[in-house]
Image (cartoon, rainbow, N blue to C red):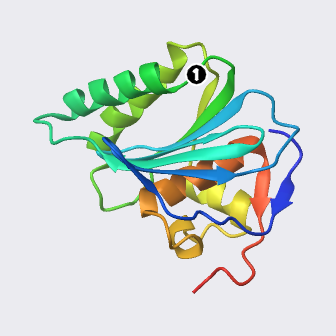
Amino acid sequence: MTDALTMKKIDFGEPTKVPFGKCWIVPFDRPYITGSIVGIDPGSRYGVTIIHDTFMTILGGAFIRQRTEEEYAELAFDMMSELIVLGTNMAAIEGPSYGSPYHQAGLAHIRMGFYLGLRQRFIPTTLVAPKSARKFVFGSGKIRASEVWTTINPNAADSVAIAMYAAGITYDIQGDLK
């Protein structure tokens, strides 16, 4: 990770409807970033954030219903193969939330689809525990991204936090918590 820089406000604006969900393109002036950095909140409902040097692309959506987790993994793999551009420096994927009551075993398949789709493009990729990313970005692992950024869907918000973690960027939450 690079040295931490602090952001004070992100104005997400109105999303654009795209076939796979909603897309926000947000000004994001970080000239020290060359290439792109990707953050992913995996699942059948997903968030993908790509930080570029002057803007962020944020996707929040849901895969069409599949019969098995393996089929979701294939969709995640294909999405990464088609969406992520060459010149991406690194990626971080939200890892499992141990002790969470949600279907962590099923999410493992989808997470691996995202992971392999990135690695197939030779992009260094890491898994990060949700609380570890939140602690770095917000200063506390108890603060959820969806509590800070309420104007975008929770999966998109989580992916922004994961991408900021990967980029070494902290966020000043003063005034954003409701």
Relative to 117, 6 lies left or right: right
Residue 60 drawn above or below residue 67 = below
- Name which residue lies at 67% across and 28% down: 90
Residue 74 percent across, percent down from the top left = 28, 24
Residue 86 drawn above or below residue 12 = above
Write down the quadrant of residue 18 in the picture. top left
- Name which residue lies at 70% across and 42% down: 166
- Name which residue lies at 20% across and 28% down: 71
Question: 10 Å neighbourhood of mark 1: few (<14), some, or many (≥20)?
Answer: few
Q: Which residue is mark 1?
A: 85
Q: Label 1: state its secondary structure.
A: loop
What amino acid is found at the position of numbered circle 1 in the picture?
A: Val
Write down the quadrant of residue 37 in the picture. top right
Q: How many marks?
A: 1
Residue 131 percent across, percent down from the top left = 59, 59
Would residue 16 be visible to someone looking at this image?
A: yes
Residue 11 drawn above or below residue 43 = below
Would residue 94 be visible to someone looking at this image?
A: no
Q: Quadrant of the N terminus?
A: top right
Q: Quadrant of the C terminus?
A: bottom right
Relative to 39, 63 lies left or right: left
